[in-house]
Image (tube, rainbow, N blue to C red):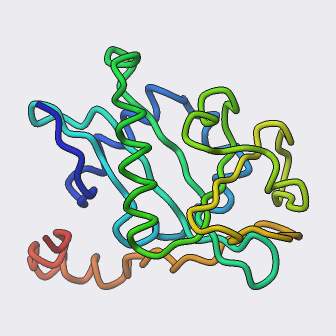
Amino acid sequence: MITIREETFRDVDARETLLDTCFGPARFQKTCERLREGRLPADGLALVIEMDGRIVGTVRLWHVSAGPGRPALMLGPIAVDPALQGLGLGGKLMREALARAAELGHGSVLLVGDAPYYDRFGFSTQMTEGLWMPGPFERERFLALELRAGALSGARGLVSATGAFEEKPDLAALVAAAAQGHWAALRPAA
C-alpha cells in the first residue's frame, strides 16, 4: 500500500538518497537549485510517497516570484524510486501536489522539466515566454501551469526565490551543549 503524506525531518536522509539515486550530484548544479538553496519548501507542499515503511517518491514546491510582485511556486525536484517507475506513482504524486497547492490558494506553478511528461498535467511554455531564470536553462523545458485563471497573465521578468530561509543550527550552541552532556539539545524537534 502507498501513502502520500507531508515530509517530516525523519524523511530527510531517505529523500536525499532517493534524489541522489535519480539525479546524481549534477542536481546541485541546476539553476532551479539556486532558487531552493537555503530556503524552506512552501508549507504543506513537501510530500513523500511511503510504501511499506520506505520513502519511494518525493516532491517539493517552493515560493518564488514570477517577475516583480507576482507570487508563484516552483516545483522540483520530483522523483520516484527507479525500480518503481512506470507504475503511475509520479503522476499520483504530481496530482496530489497540485491539488494541495490549489487548496492552499496558490495561483501558479513553474518548473523546468520534460514538456511531453508535464503536458498531461496542463503545463506549457506559453506562460513562461516573458520570464527568465537566474542562470542557464532550456527555454523549451521552462513550463508553467495556472491553478487560478490569470495568475500568470502578463508575467514578465526574472524568477526569484521568495520563500522563508532555512533555519541554520547555531554551531556554537550545539558544541556547548555537547560539551556539557546535553544530548537532547542536539536532536531535532519532533
Does residue 163 sit above or below 152 in this rendering? below
Q: How many marks?
A: 0
Does residue 122 sit above or below 109 in this rendering? above
Give the residue drawn at x 82%, y 57%: 133
- Within the image, what quadrant is residue 108 found in? bottom right
Q: Nearer the viewer, residue 72 or 63?
A: 72
Q: Nearer the viewer, residue 184 or 24?
A: 24
Does residue 165 sit above or below 130 in this rendering? below
Side of 167 relative to 29 (left or right): left
Give the residue drawn at x 66%, y 55%: 110
| Outermost residue toward the front in this view | 149
Measured as percent of width and height from the top left, residue 93 is found at 37, 42
Side of 26 relative to 170 (left or right): right
Q: The N terminus lies in which quarter of the figure?
A: top left
Measured as percent of width and height from the top left, residue 25 is found at 58, 34
Q: Nearer the viewer, residue 117 or 27?
A: 117
Q: Nearer the viewer, residue 38 or 68?
A: 68
Q: The C terminus lies in which quarter of the figure?
A: bottom left
Give the residue drawn at x 37%, y 62%: 100
Does residue 30 sit above or below 39 in this rendering? above
Give the residue drawn at x 24%, y 37%: 55
Measured as percent of width and height from the top left, residue 14 is found at 28, 40
Side of 14 relative to 188 (left or right): right
Measured as percent of width and height from the top left, residue 70 is found at 72, 79
